[in-house]
Image (cartoon, grey):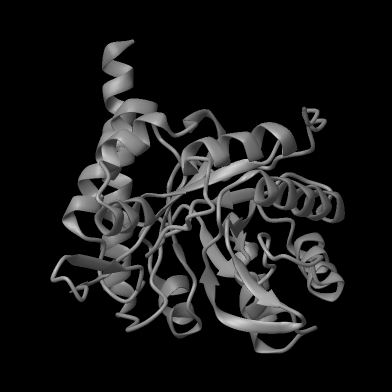
Amino acid sequence: MHPIAPSRPFATLPATAGVGFKPQHFDAILADPREVGFFEVHAENYFGAGGPPHRRLTALRERFPLSIHGVGLSIGGAGRLDPDHLARLATLVARYEPEAVSEHLAWSSHGGVGFPDLLPLPLNEETLARVVEHIDETQEALGRRMLLENPSTYFRFAESTIPEVEFLAEVARRTDCGLLLDVANVDVSATNHGFDPRAYLAAFPMEQVGEIHLAGRFETVDDAGLPLFIDAHDSPVADPVWALYGEVIGRIGPVPTLIERDDAIPTWEVLAAEVARAGAILDGARGGRRDAA
């Protein structure tokens, strides 16, 4: 049995609603008095040493909590982690000291070649051992705990022997990492594979969740005419995802929640309205818990 890793420092985001930062919104953000709990950035966009990206991020960091979300470390990759990539991530984390650092249960590189996607993994003992090893290495390099995000998937591997929720829970147990619960990913995978998203969420180890993601999707059909959802991040959060999110927050209480939008970027006012909607659900959970007390 793999020993439980010793606890590392784990800075936490406030249990409020945040949004992914886009440079075109920078001036509007600074001028907008509406409350945003935190901002999230993709780590790889800030691997350079300086210039306008870092000037903007420094200005944001002076005013807001920060989450750094990696998309290219390839935690599930078959080979060793790219030491240069990991070193750049560690430098970025040391520079900005964010409240959260996260990555995906996926792979995105092989044999020194990177792919512009987050690719799925067979969930079995071999993959579990590899993911645990890579998270241990990452947390050692960062000197802190990270969050691991549940994937959106479009097919299943015959080699998979461990249910996804059990896999994530065991990774967290062995490495002492936290989890990032992407409710939109649950909705996408549940539709594509025909399982009950509420049953998945009921089994999820919520005590390990340090952040929640909400995002839009692209809806189509497969060759058999069955519904097929794509995790697209190019549209508003869908109503069924809002419903699932409300149920989760109603059950476990407020958790830092991020609105993701990475394509077809709307105006700041449109994104801020989605942040406000998530914030209202979080505030409602706080009020209900005060009433119960």
What is the quadrant of residue 184 in the picture? bottom left
Q: Is residue 33 visible?
A: yes
The residue sitting at 58% across, 56% down in the picture is 105
Give the percent coordinates (x, y) of residue 146: 68, 49
The quarter in which the C terminus is drawn is: top left
Q: Is residue 12 visible to us here? A: no
Q: Is residue 23 left or right of residue 286?
A: right
| Front residue of 230 and 102 | 230
Give the left or right position of residue 109, taking residue 89 as reference: left
Q: Quadrant of residue 245?
A: top left
In the picture, the quarter occupied by the N terminus is: top right
**Residue lying furthest left in this view?**
225
Q: Is residue 233 above or below residue 198?
A: below
Instruction: Please determine whether, in this image, residue 259 is positioned above or below residue 285.
Output: below
Residue toward you, 68 or 161: 161
Observer-nearest of 48 and 127: 127
Check the image and report above or below for 250 versus 77: above
Residue farthest along the bottom direction in this orientation: 51
In x, y percent, where is residue 56?
61, 78
Q: Residue at x 58, y 59 (%)?
A: 104
- Give the residue drawn at x 25%, y 52%: 241
| Residue found 38% across the figure and 69% down from its top | 32
The percent position of residue 223, horizontal first and vertical second, equals 20, 76
